[in-house]
Image: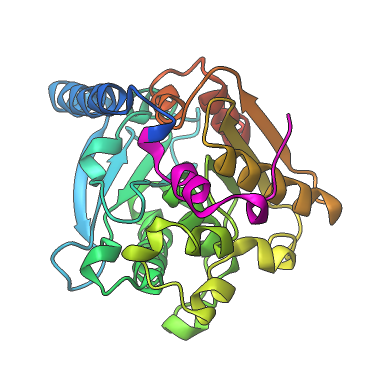
Amino acid sequence: MKITPWTELTQEQLDWAYLQSNHAPNMAEVTKRCEELSTKNRAWLKDHPALGLEQTFSYNAQAHTTLDWYTPPSGAHDIHESSPAPVVFFVNGGAWKSGHSHGYALPMKWLLERGVHLVVPNFCAVTDCDGELTVLLKELQQAYSFCASHAPALGGDPAQIHVLGHSSGAHLAASLKVSDWSASQLQEPSMASLLLVSGMYDLEAVSHSSRSEYVNFSKETLQTMSPQRHIKRFISPPGLEVTFCCGTQESPEFIRQSSSMHEALSSQGHATQMIWCDGVNHFEILEQLGEIESQVSQALLKHLKTP
């Protein structure tokens, strides 16, 4: 597919490219279906306590910094009940300013049925922290560190935490990998894989769009929180599985961002994968997580190495 460099876009075209409602006329409808499925899954779990448990934890002292942890029954993933289970750490999107963990239990049911934990953190909206994306990243570092340290007690494997992110959540998920954990006085936990769905990986173009009205794109933020500028962090230590998914009906800028990041990793010899979901827009690709047979869910299962 033809990809136009962002520098060749007019201001009007750039603003158009980063406003998702322009590219997904069914945005409200699909978003509602995703929320309804999440509610349905959570109700299902309450009705079937033998199949798993939903718990809410605070990962720091702030009221909003909670995470939902969906735990499968002991031994569900393996014939050896003492064997720890994989964990999916799901970072939601919402243009960095919206979304709640309760609305992202889309893959919870089929993950629990396969003995996999699902952890969905809440974090600050950028509009509530003076536009500073670094605040969101720091909170996600704390949430991820909490996940890794508490996984053993809940039957999870801290060495098998698979990170999933959608949209601005994919940007933050990728930023987790390249960030300076020592600056937050945290030891960087291991990361088994990254599944990045319809994200942004260099913020330069975004900083020239209307999103600059509520995000403080300082020079420091552009540098530290543009994962594509830190490719070597993805390949050290070696072995991290990285898969990109993007819909063919996405905004041209989101298509360019995914393609460019994938090519940048590939150019360094990283065996990354790019999956194009034909005929799918930015919100329909998120909805795919509710169906195990979808391309996005199958990509996640491949990372989990779970049938």
Instruction: Indicate the quadrant containing the C terminus: top left, top right, bottom left or bottom right.
Output: top right
Taking the spot 45% from the left edge, 78% from the top edge, the residue there is 186
Q: In the image, is residue 185 above or below residue 177?
A: below
Q: Does the image show residue 190? A: no
Q: Does the image show residue 29? A: yes
Image position, residue 158 (x, y; %):
49, 56
Taking the spot 43% from the left edge, 50% from the top edge, the residue there is 169
Colouring of the image: rainbow
User: Is 249 positioned to the left or the right of 261 in the image?
Assistant: left
Taking the spot 27% from the left edge, 31% from the top edge, the residue there is 52
Q: Which of 141 and 256 is in front in this view?
A: 256
Q: Which of 54 and 51 is in front in this view?
A: 54
Magenta span of residues: 1-21
Q: Does the magenta stretch include residue 20?
A: yes
Quadrant hosting residue 190: bottom right
Image position, residue 238 (x, y; %):
76, 58
Q: In the image, is residue 227 above or below residue 244?
A: below
Q: Is residue 56 magenta?
A: no
Taking the spot 68% from the left edge, 52% from the top edge, the residue there is 240
Instruction: Indicate the quadrant containing the N terminus: top left, top right, bottom left or bottom right.
Output: top right
Image position, residue 138 (x, y; %):
39, 72
Q: In the image, is residue 148 above or below residue 92?
A: below
Q: Nearer the viewer, residue 262 or 256?
A: 256
Q: In the image, is residue 77 above or below residue 92?
A: above
User: Is 266 positioned to the left or the right of 168 in the image?
Assistant: right
